[in-house]
Amino acid sequence: MAPLVLVVEDDAMLSDVLRMYLEKEGYEVKVIADGLDGLTQALVARPALVVLDVMLPRLDGWEIIRQLREVSEVPIILLTARGEEADKLMGFDLGADDYLAKPFSMQEFLARARALLKRSGGMPKAHRQPAAAPAAPAPMEGVLTFPTLLIDERRHRVERNGKQIPLTPKEFDLLIYLANRPGTVVRRDELLQEIWGYSPSEDDRTIHTHINRLRAKLEGQDYHYIHTVWGIGYKFEVTRQ
């Protein structure tokens, strides 16, 4: 069965184009033009990806993200006609995984959609590549353990002090990428390429916002995990607060 992409967009022309390109990629597509109905469908239909406009009838995109993130980690691409930095950062703060300001190219949209769906396991079968054999067995069969922190790569599950921490797909990908390289400084441009799957502008606020959200969810009164190396990037290293 093809993965479902939910497009919540009240511009009929744009939603028709998005549907056409996504269906050519092998996805099932459901288009909703109303914010409240879009939220309902996102909760009921359990899509692999939500493509969400900001300005919508009855319920705007900001509120949809707020409510979705209380119960779901579905990848979200936010679309808006407003390209202001504040809107972009608000979207990331609320839990969006990616952001496109209108007008945008369909090639760029599809590249970002593929990157999100690949990481969340929602790629159509025709696009999936056989998994390469790992260079070495992962410790504890894909489970990374640190003081008070457990990361299960297979189940996409993170626990701190035995309590599960809900992460968005992008937050989980960032954590896995850094945690698999403990003590190694990872450059921002490497994270942008490897986690987002494309090379955006030199503005690195996207990573900054996601790192801050990840820290807020992970860190308590005892340990610090993700460190900023100013002017270069970030590293995963367990230290006491």
Image (cartoon, helix red, strand yellow):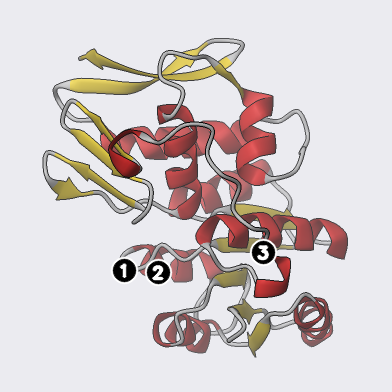
The residue to which callout 2 is attached is: 68
Q: Residue at x 43, y 53 (%)?
A: 168
Q: Is residue 49 above or below residue 217?
A: below
Q: Secondary structure at mark 1?
A: loop
Q: Secondary structure at mark 3?
A: loop
Asked if the residues shown at circle 1 and circle 2 are in contact, with their CB atoms under 8 angstroms apart, the answer is: yes
Asked if residue 230 shows in the view, the reply is yes
**Count of labels in the image:** 3
Q: Is residue 13 above or below residue 170?
A: below
Q: Earlier in the sequence, mark 2 or mark 3?
A: 2
Instruction: Please tell me in which quadrant of the rendered image residue 145 appears.
Output: top left
Asked if residue 105 shows in the view, the reply is no
Separation of marks 1 and 2 at Cα, in angstroms: 6 Å
Residue 84's label in the rendered image is none
Residue 71's label in the rendered image is 1
- Estimate the x, y position of residue 31 in percent, counting from the top left: 65, 87
Q: Residue at x 44, y 29 (%)?
A: 180
Q: Residue at x 67, y 64 (%)?
A: 128
The residue to which callout 3 is attached is: 128
Amino acid of disc 1: Val
